[in-house]
Image: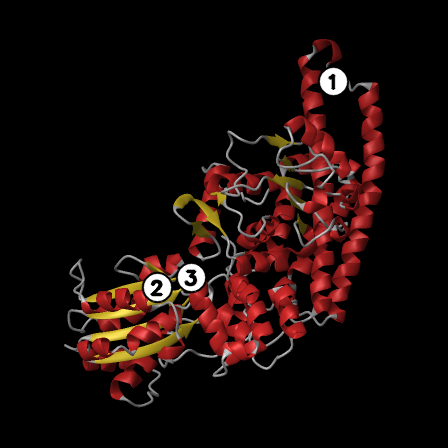
Amino acid sequence: MEVVGGALLSSFLSVLFDRLASRPVVDFIRGQKITSGLLKKLRIKLLSVNSVLDDAEEKQFNNPAVREWLDELKDALYAADDLLDVIKTEALRRKLEGDESESSSSRKSQVPISSSTWIDEFDKTMEPKIVEMLERLEFIVNEKDVLGLNEGVPNRRPQSRLSATSLVEEDGVYGRDEDKETTVKLLLSDDANGNKLSVIPVVGMGGIGKTTLAQLVYNDARVKQHFDLQAWVYVSEEFDVVRITQIIYGSVISQTCSITDLNLLQVKLKEALTGKKCFFVHDDVWNENYIHWDALRCSFESVAHGSKIIVTTRNQRVASMMGTVTTYHLNHISDEDCGLLFSKHAFGRINSAVHPTLEEISSGIIKKCKGLPLAAKSLGGLLRCKQSYEEWDEILKSEIWDLQDEYTILPALRLSYHHLPSHLKRCFSYCSIFPKGYKFGKSELVLLWMAEGFLSPQRKKMMEDVGVEYFDEVISRSFFQHSGDDQSLFTMHDLINDLAKFVSREFCFRLDDSDSFNNVSSKTRHFSYTQNSPFLEGLGVGVHATAKEEISGFDKFEALCEAKYLRTFLAIKPGPLWNIFSFNKVQLYQVQPRTSAGMIQNSFIR
């Protein structure tokens, strides 16, 4: 398993290293001194660039030059992958041809003249391509010094966020009354499993209001009356057992705790908690290490029956590790409640009717939030000091990532992305190819990942099973969510979709109502279009087109010639479920690699 928080391109490099070490490639270069030396140099270049990826990935969010450098590097890595794919394909062709020759006694140990000529031509053309690739990588690697990228930066976290406290402005919370009542009942009721200490996990995507819910129940009068002691701990990314224990003990004795010896600290806390019914909140937990959690939990063994802990997290794995009861999954608030929250922060105490033109455009901005409270609060705060229609319209039409302001949603969702392992970052960024609101099935997306080579082979496991593990982990981290009543389908929140689009950039292109073919670039590797797009009128490609008509219409996509190394072509048929992947409705075509001809390489899906 790759390191959590590793750079996206680390997974690309991992695939390239595997290809360089694969048997077909090794067999091909054996005995070819020049080619062998060049490929060794390629490996060294890849290793040198790998050392700065974590630093570059972190700086790209605030430095456009670093972001552009990463795009150039990613494009070069795609090209290197294409080159190795050609070598691998040629090696397999030669092996197959050799096996056929050996099976024929009349041609035993002979190589056909035509094949020999092809081999010579292939070897002659391959060497300059490898040299060109090395020169390109060398230029890109040298640029890292100009950008101030550092080697060996250990999984640096994004800039720290403001710690969440237990205080909350209750009249500023909308749409959580039912969630609050359900959670309070859990706190006041006995544990069905007879546990002395119950741990209630609250799980949801970043910005959905997990902390707000915890604040509401923490300050509820019924809860305060029910428990003898309460303590609030903002845990965040670093699960420091000493720090967390200090905070809880400090809350119990009502003063700051300076004890740093863990043994002494835990003994004192255990004594203070003996026989007391306690309620703790562990807010924003990321730790998946059971040993760390177990080390903290031993201090709580002396509490009275009926004690409770609420854990808020974005990760279902954390919830499963810490929880003793069923996870409480927090959902989005309604558009109506989202509108009330937005208006509170956008207009303050001023009646929104005072600004009728702004009130009119606010409905579009509220829809942009898709029931995510943090988005409504952030955009409302951003627009609070902007009173012109033009300024509000600009916010409505902009990508959420273009809003470089302290109030934006970017830091919250960026943190979720930061914690993804690199192999999952690659799979997630690919999902930007899906339109907003698109509903997909698990097996269908796994097949797409397989076709693109995103899944790392594991011993004694079928690739489909590896893909299911990837998918389940992405779900557990709140990037995907179940779609409505159909539990077999999944979707992404619009802002998560925006995040995928931001990190994939030019490499994934989705043709929808707001784009045109003019935005396709030479870096584009994955392409999709919606079949009722107005840009396709008159092209003979659409929802009602037959398969034969649609295939004949593909030559109309002349603008895609710019994407010379396209790997994926997806035609999406909209419908009640936005689901084109039911196998009784569509066909999946696997295309043989033809990279050298600039053709589609891995998958062609319609």
The reply to whether callout 3 and callout 2 are in contact (CB within 8 Å) is no
Residue type, mark 3 in image: His
Q: Secondary structure at mark 2?
A: strand
Under tag 1, what secondary structure?
loop
Q: Going 57% across and 74% down the picture, which residue do you hit?
A: 356
Specify the amino acid type for callout 2. Val
In the rendered structure, the answer to whether residue 365 lies left or right of residue 64 reads left
Check disc 2 and report the residue beneath it. Answer: 202
Q: How is the image coloured?
A: secondary structure
Q: Quadrant of residue 62?
A: bottom right
Rounded to the nearest whole Å, what is the CA distance between mark 3 and mark 1? 69 Å
Q: Which residue is mark 1?
A: 109
**Number of the front mark, 1 or 2:** 2
What's the CA distance linking mark 3 and mark 2?
13 Å
Place of residue 15 in the rendered image (x, y in percent of width and height, measured from the top left): 62, 47
Q: Nearer the viewer, residue 540 or 135?
A: 540
Residue 277 in the image, given as x and y percentages of width and height: 18, 75
Gap in angstroms between the C-alphas marked 1 and 2: 68 Å
Contact, mark 3 vs mark 1 (Cβ under 8 Å):
no
Give the percent coordinates (x, y) of residue 39. 74, 46
Q: Nearer the viewer, mark 3 or mark 1?
A: 3
Residue 559 position (above or below residue 109): below
Question: Mark 1 or mark 2, which has the lower sequence index?
Answer: 1
Eyeballing the image, is 55 above or below 11? below
Q: Residue 156, can we see it?
A: no
Task: Tell me the kind of residue under disc 1.
Answer: Ser
User: Mark 3 — residue?
Assistant: 332
